[in-house]
Amino acid sequence: QVHLVESGGGLVQAGESLRLSCAISGSAFRVNLMGWYRQAPGKQRELVAIFTTRQATKYGDSVKGRFTISRDNAKNTVSLQMNSLKPEDTAVYYCAADRLGIGSPDAWGQGTLVNVYE
């Protein structure tokens, strides 16, 4: 069974930075740790930054140039460096993984809250 454990969320002022991390707990065999999605109150879950099946990176339009995703395959971790945070970045951030090799996430972490104030 795969568990995704996120860390690094918190309360920050606009313009500041945060770094989120996600680690696989349990069997990581053939699990593709994809990256990050987020869900703000009253909104649908949206893509933030992921590694695609071709190992390229894909970013949501609203975070391009501010967020950077990275991965350590040896440690089975994926991280998200978030700079120049804005209040509209406030959301619960979820780590996502693809266990089936279909290129879409089918496993999620419990989420970590990022709260950005003016």
Image (spheres, grey):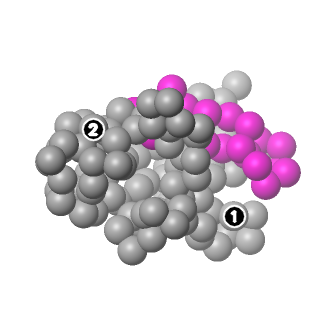
Give 38 or 95, whichever is nearer the viewer.
Answer: 38
Q: Of the residues under marks 1 and 2, which one precedes in the sequence?
A: 1
User: Residue 106 sits in which quadrant?
Assistant: top right
Q: Give the crowd class for mark 1: few <14, some 14-19, many >=20 residues within 10 Å.
A: some
Which residue is located at x 50 percent, y 42 percent?
Answer: 38
Q: Farthest residue in the front direction?
A: 42
User: In this rendering, is residue 63 above or below 93?
Assistant: below
Task: Give residue 55's position: percent from left, percent from top.
Answer: 67, 70
Number of callouts in the render?
2
- The span shown in magenta is 93-112
Whether residue 12 is visible = yes
**What's the residue type where badge 1 is placed?**
Thr
Task: Give residue 16's position: percent from left, percent from top.
Answer: 17, 56
Whether residue 7 is visible = no
**What's the residue type where badge 2 is placed?**
Asn
User: Residue 117 sits in which quadrant?
Assistant: top left
Q: Secondary structure at mark 2?
A: strand
Which residue is located at x 36 percent, y 49 percent?
Answer: 89
Tell me the tag on residue 115.
2
Which residue is located at x 79 percent, y 55 percent?
Answer: 103
Task: Give residue 50's position: percent from left, percent from top.
Answer: 59, 59
Tell me the tag on residue 52.
1
Q: Secondary structure at mark 1?
A: loop
Query: Which label lies toward us, 1 or 2?
Result: 2
Dividing the image into 4 quarters, which one contains the N terminus? top right
